[in-house]
Amino acid sequence: MSISIASEKSLLSHDEFEAIKPTHHPAISSLSVEILQEAQRDLRQRRDKTRTVARQNRRRAQSRRGAREVVPAGEEAHAGKRKQVFAQALKRVNHELQRRHEVAAREALMDSAKRALELRRGKAPASRPAAGPSAGEGMTPKPSRRRTVEVAGREVGRVSKATKVAQAKRDS
């Protein structure tokens, strides 16, 4: 769940809130990439430091379960919520950097596509011969290497007729 700006202001010191303030919506889009990267490093350090404090508080509370609890004062009081504030600000900065990276990549892709189209349009057409009305002679046939047997017309049915006659003699 997101934390309101008023809650952020009450949880953080003035310096910390000033570091978080430009990461909110209208202001974050006007920042340059270098400033966003610097804010990313700063927020990461602050989040890690606050996370360490929150873990120490949890360990302290677990170690003296039976004993009377000493409530941490100052910055240590709401270390868990403060860590969430820094984590959300870091998430906003990361998202904005990612968005800008995607926009730059999209623009680069469009530029290269336009350049390719210009090159293609400027290129001379390929020189191909005209098709003409017909295909011409076409391929030359390759002669068969099989032996050709020339059989006379009267010889064509002689063998099969002789077989029929021989079979008829055997049957009778």
Image (tube, rainbow, N blue to C red):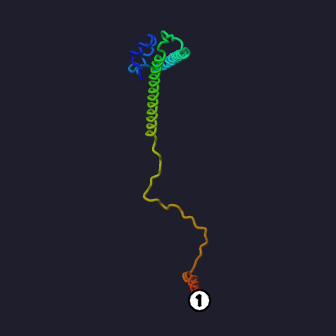
Does residue 60 lie above or below 171 as drawn? above
Quadrant in the picture for residue 152? bottom right
Quadrant in the picture for residue 110? top left
The residue located at (55%, 14%) in the rendering is 64
In percent of width and height, residue 18 lies at 43, 13
The answer to whether any part of residue 113 appears in the image is yes
Q: Secondary structure at mark 1?
A: helix
Q: Is residue 144 left or right of residue 17?
A: right
Q: Badge 1: few (under 14), some or many (20 or more) residues near its Cα, within 10 Å?
A: few
Does residue 2 lie above or below 76 as drawn? below
Looking at the picture, tell me which residue is in the foreground, 4 or 133: 4
Does residue 155 lie above or below 20 as drawn? below
Quarter of the image that includes the N terminus: top left
The residue located at (39%, 18%) in the rendering is 4
In percent of width and height, residue 94 lies at 47, 24
Kind of residue at disc 1: Lys
Residue on which disc 1 sits: 169
In percent of width and height, residue 14 lies at 44, 10
Looking at the picture, tell me which residue is in the foreground, 146 or 96: 96
The residue located at (42%, 58%) in the rendering is 133
Looking at the picture, tell me which residue is in the foreground, 54 or 151: 54
